[in-house]
Image (spheres, rainbow, N blue to C red):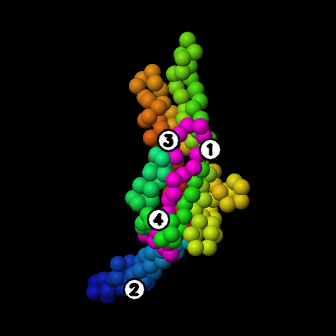
Amino acid sequence: MTSTTTASNRQLSPEGSPFRTLSVRSLSMLVIVGMLLGIAGCGYHVGSTFPPQYRTVAVPMFKSNSYRRGFEVRLTEAVQQEIQSQTHMRLANEPYADTRLVGTIVEIRKDVLGETAFDDPRELQLSIALEMRWEDARTGEVISQNTIPLNGQTTQLIANGEFAPEVGHSLATATQETVDELARKVVQQMEAPW
């Protein structure tokens, strides 16, 4: 009798049940498939997020509508460095490039954010506004469609840098931080839309 009871207990125990094994396998497969579908549906992309059909880009010297000179040189150099470090594209001269990235500094402002009791600036903010356009050099077609149009085919980007001369921050440091931030924003505009 004990052998019959033990045999029937084994058949009813969850460890030996083929139904339990099947449901654990099914459940784990269902979870894996669900995760894969979830990742695929979220728009994640493995690899470069820049359009693969373009290999070279020309970045001519940015123009400036501001009376402050020198910013266009620093910004052009920063954008070129950012393209080289963050994208698969190489820099090329205009006749040999697949694409062209042009920009114009629209405005450079230095605003006072805080003052001392004697009306001396305590904290300042440097702002640079830029219009940029990335286009196919062969057709003239605007490549970046995920931008906010300003006047049809340009995008306006703004970067700010704060500095406090009272504690040793300088305009040069704020300028470099602002230019670097703006260069990152320009290159982000070159990414393929999700």
Q: Amino acid at mark 4?
A: Asn
The local crowd at label 2, few if under 14, some if 14 to 19, many if 20 or more residues have their Cα within 10 Å, is few
> Dot 1: what SS?
loop
Q: Which residue is mark 2?
A: 18
Q: Amino acid at mark 2?
A: Pro
The picture quadrant where one finds residue 17 is bottom left
Q: CA distance from mark 2 to mark 3?
A: 76 Å
- Judge depth for marks 2 and 3 and give the one in front: 3
Q: CA distance from mark 3 to mark 4?
A: 22 Å
Give the magenta range: 47-72
Kindly give the residue lying farthest to the left in the view shown.
3
- If you read the primary sequence from the N terminus, does the residue marked by circle 1 or circle 3 appear first? 1
Q: CA distance from mark 1 to mark 3?
A: 12 Å
* Main secondary structure of the magenta stretch: loop
Q: Indicate the position of residue 130 as horizontal and vertical percent values.
A: 59, 48
Quadrant, the C terminus? bottom right
- If you read the primary sequence from the N terminus, does the residue marked by circle 2 or circle 4 appear first? 2
Residue 19, compared with residue 31, is above or below; it is below
Q: Indicate the position of residue 158 as horizontal and vertical percent values.
A: 59, 45
> Dot 4: what SS?
loop
Q: Which residue is mark 3?
A: 70
Q: Indicate the position of residue 62 as horizontal and vertical percent values.
A: 54, 52
